Every structure is written in C-alpha cells, then in structure tokens.
Amino acid sequence: MKKILITRPMPDAVVVALAKAHKVAVRDDLQPMSRDELIAALARFDAILPTIGDAFLAEIFAAAGEIRAGLLANFGVGYNHIDVTSARAHGVEVTNTPGVLTDATADLALTLLLATARRAGEGERMLRAGLWQGWHPTQLLGQHVTGKRLGIVGMGRIGEGIARRCHFGFGMEVAYLNRSEKVLDFPARRVDTLTALAADVDFLVVAVPGGAETRHLIGAEVFSAMKSSGILVNIARGDVVDEAALIAALEAGEIAGAGLDVYENEPQVPEALRGMENVTLLPHLGSATLETRTAMGLLAADNILAFLAGEPPISPV
C-alpha cells in the first residue's frame, strides 16, 4: 500500500477512489503548501495530488534531498506552479486534468462577457444597496452582445469552447490568435498578430496557458490597440495580463471594461480594480461546478492509480 497526499480538500468521491487501494492523507488547509510542507511531501509520499499555488519549483526539488514521490498529479489544466523540467530531472512525473473542465470554464467566460457588457454586476450592487428607484429608458445602458466581433487569444479546447458558444449562441464573428490554423466546424478567422486581433474585435477573451512564455502577454500595447468600447475577459492565468497596465487602460478610458476570474497575485486583487464599476470580478470560479471539480479530481486519481500500478499515466504533461 502506497502513501498519497491530497494537498487541499476535494470532493469525497476523489478521496474514496484513492483510499480503496492506498493510504491517503488529505491536507485540510485551504491555502497553498508552504516551502517546508512541499519539501516534506516529496520525501514522505509516493504520489502527490497538488493544485494551483502549490509551488513545486526548482529550488524545492533541489532542497528535498532524497525524493520518494514519483508523481505530481496536478488538479487543473494549468501547471505553471510546477517546474516540470526540474521534476523530471529528479525522477518525478507530472500529469494534469485537460478536457474535463473545458465546458465549465467556457461557460464562465460567457458569464463574464455578458455580465460586463450588460453591466449586470453594477445593477445588482445598485439593487442590493437599496438605490434602485425603478426603470427608466437610459438606466445602465450596456453593450449589445449578439452579432458583435469576438477575439480569442489561444484557440485550444477552452478557446474553441468559448468561440463555439459565441458563434452559435450569439451569432458573433470569431477571430483568433493561435500558433497554428485550427480546423473548426464553424467560421473563424485566424489573425497574424495580437495587436491586429485586439484592434479588430469588440470582446477580447484570453484563453492561453500560463507560464513564462505568456506572462504579461496582454499589456499596454494590446490595450492601446483595442477599441475604446472594447472589453477584455481573462479566464486563463492572472499573470497573462499585466494588471498595472490594465488598470491604467481602464482609468484612461482606453477600454470600456474587463471581466476577470484570475489575478496576477491571487488572492490579492488591487483596490483599484475592486473600486471600478465597469469591471466584473469573480474569485477564480472557472471550473467551479461540483460535476467538473469531481471529474478533475477523479482524472487526477486515475493518473495516480495507473502510475502506482506500474502503468503509464493517462494525461502526462
């Protein structure tokens, strides 16, 4: 019987799936693991199920000494909190959970887009504060969504899911930036540069992976290129967007608004953003449905069970 660590509370089905065959420890702290915890985990457990914020970086592997863990089965698609090169150099495999969270995250992107365009958050705050004095013709006039132009930065599974919803559900024209041309069953136009995409669309949705290559990909140059009526939506990773540049663009009226589910220094969200009525802010809810989070955990568990049985992991990174 092997020892497995789950670094945050998970849906019960995930723990049960692993506990049938192995000894499972569940860390009940809701915060990411500390440096000492990360090092100790590598030495004490055969497999670890970590998630966002559990920073298994190069220096952690270097400081760990003799490493017992053979697998980090990440809970989530993004794994920029894990130094995969260092992990492999120390004999540790890494997996993630692609596919199972596509629909939930794409749905949330539409939630942010619609809420920001139609000023839903602003309206709800007004009503809850007891400030609504009844309907009138010019109250909280937002932007029409149907028939507008959508730009997707990163046409992977989630980007395609967002584009599909916008095309079929709202009759939107879709353009996208991606390393390669995508074969799609709906019309979408590939654009050569990020600034050209930003200038051409009404809504710019960010759906690229996190990591060094995409850090601050969306910055001042992109905001300058966007229409003054443009809205940015980010459901990728917080540091893909230069938060200071976003705040400056919003304050200067370079863009009309933003819908954000992720932040550069989570869980800290700048006061400037929290004070803006034209910004919709959600606490990293992208995959937050019971069905999706359970499916993510079970895929991570399946990766662990396969690895500990001497079989290839299901979804290696």
Image: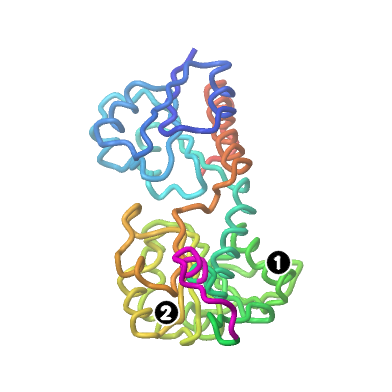
Q: Which residue is mark 2?
A: 222
Quarter of the image holding residue 212? bottom left
Work out whether residue 199 or residue 265 is closer to the camera in this orientation and state it. 265
Q: Quick one: SS at disc 2?
A: helix
Choose mark 1 or mark 2, whichever is in front.
2
| Mark 1, other Cα within 10 Å: few <14 / some 14–19 / many ≥20 | few
Q: Earlier in the sequence, mark 1 or mark 2?
A: 1
- Percent across and percent down for residue 278 are 44, 75
Work out whether residue 85 or residue 152 is closer to the camera in this orientation and state it. 152
Measuring 50% from the left and 60% from the top, which residue is drawn there? Answer: 235
Measuring 43% from the left and 30% from the top, which residue is drawn there? Answer: 48
- Percent across and percent down for residue 299 are 59, 36
Measuring 50% from the left and 67% from the top, which residue is drawn there? Answer: 127
Left or right: residue 181 versus residue 2 is: right
Q: Which residues are magenta?
A: 123-136
Check disc 1 and give the amino acid type.
Answer: Val
- Above-or-below relation of 189 to 47: below
Q: Which residue is mark 1?
A: 183
Q: How far, Cα to Cα, is label 1 from label 2?
A: 26 Å
Determine contact: label 1, label 2, CB under 8 Å.
no
Q: Quick one: SS at disc 1?
A: loop
